[in-house]
Amino acid sequence: MYKKKVFFNQSLKDLNTFAVDVTAKKIIFVKTIKSLINISKICKVSNIPYIILGEGSNVLFLENYRGIVIINRIKGIKIVEKKNSWLLYVFSGEKLHDLVKFTLNLGIFGLENLALIPGCIGSAAIQNIGAYGLEFKDICEYVDVLSLKNNITTRINKKFCKFSYRNSIFKNQYNYENAIIGVGIKLSKTWNPTIFSSLENYIKPKDITAHKIFNIICTIRTKKLPNPKKIGNAGSFFKNPIIKKEQAQKLINLYNIPNYPQKNGLVKISGGWLIEHYQFKNIQIGDATIHKRQRLILINKKNATSKEIIKLAKIIHACIFKKFNILLEPEIDFIGPKGKIKSSDIFKLKIF
């Protein structure tokens, strides 16, 4: 028999970083792949919906969940040394920040720019998380996906993962009958720092080390971003828009908006800038409001409900479209009573 923790009608407030107080029929912590398979079988036989979460750092539960929430605590890190590189196999329940610290302490460099990003390795692959010039796709070699239909694990090479800005094949084409169980990461022994724009404000180029980059990023993120352990949030609620060059140029001419040309000819613009320059005047719906320093982040000041957060998000979404003709795309996942809900079903824009 596998060991598990089971709770009945337990609050999910401490298991989602938005700290929204909703419940699940059951919450089950799993530490092994076998446990995960067994629980999914029980759910299928009993016709009970289920979802798999890591840290709950990129979701918003819209209401009480009518099924089982499986909390992934499948952990382990395997390292193989090659002549020119380190090959890591990381199980999906490992926290990303813990992995960054672990590798640094071993003298294995290359993950330092991902310091203090909340969530587990499984969600890092799903979201193609990134910060300060580095994305998950830059260090990923493959992703192992377990089919909970036939219990077969498939290794998906990086080139077939369809990684893009905060997106991957796992977010769009894999449903809850599949689970990421581990990822392969390759880090070169020849360390080349990933330089980001504000780094020179903290350190001279000749003094750069992986440990110093790690410490600098931890300092920046601590000052700039709300700590989900203290203030409920799921990081950036909306993505930075990526738009056509012609549309971007019009906005740049009108507003001198911060912009970042992409390799595919498109242009990424600052979503936080758009929200800030719409000049919402201390807008707050219940306990849901916009973070003062990072405008893409919506926060739960104390006891915000999901309805209040969604109402606030819809107002922002509509106002930005009205002024800038840009549709902000949510970055987080929305969970309804039986599973994931498409953001397009929530953000149905009115015609002004």
Image: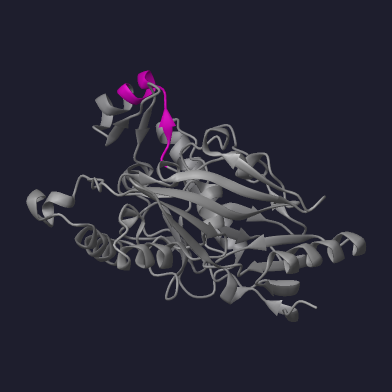
Inspect this view and state whether residue 64 appears.
Answer: no
Inspect this view and state whether residue 42 appears.
Answer: yes
x and y, in percent, of residue 27 in the image: 71, 74
* Quadrant position of the C terminus in the picture: top right
Asked if 338 appears above or below 279 in the picture, the reply is below
Q: Is residue 152 left or right of residue 260?
A: right
* Quadrant position of the N terminus in the picture: bottom right
x and y, in percent, of residue 4 in the image: 72, 79
Asked if 216 appears above or below 193 in the picture, the reply is below
Which contiguous range is marked in magenta?
A: 240-249
| Nearer to us in this view, 249 or 44 | 44
| Nearer to us in this view, 213 or 233 | 213
Residue sitting farthest toward the top: 246
Quadrant of the rendered image containing residue 226: bottom left
x and y, in percent, of residue 101 in the image: 35, 67
Asked if 188 appears above or below 306 in the picture, the reply is above
Q: Is 1 one of the magenta-colored residues?
A: no
The residue lying at 42 percent from left, 76 percent from top is 230
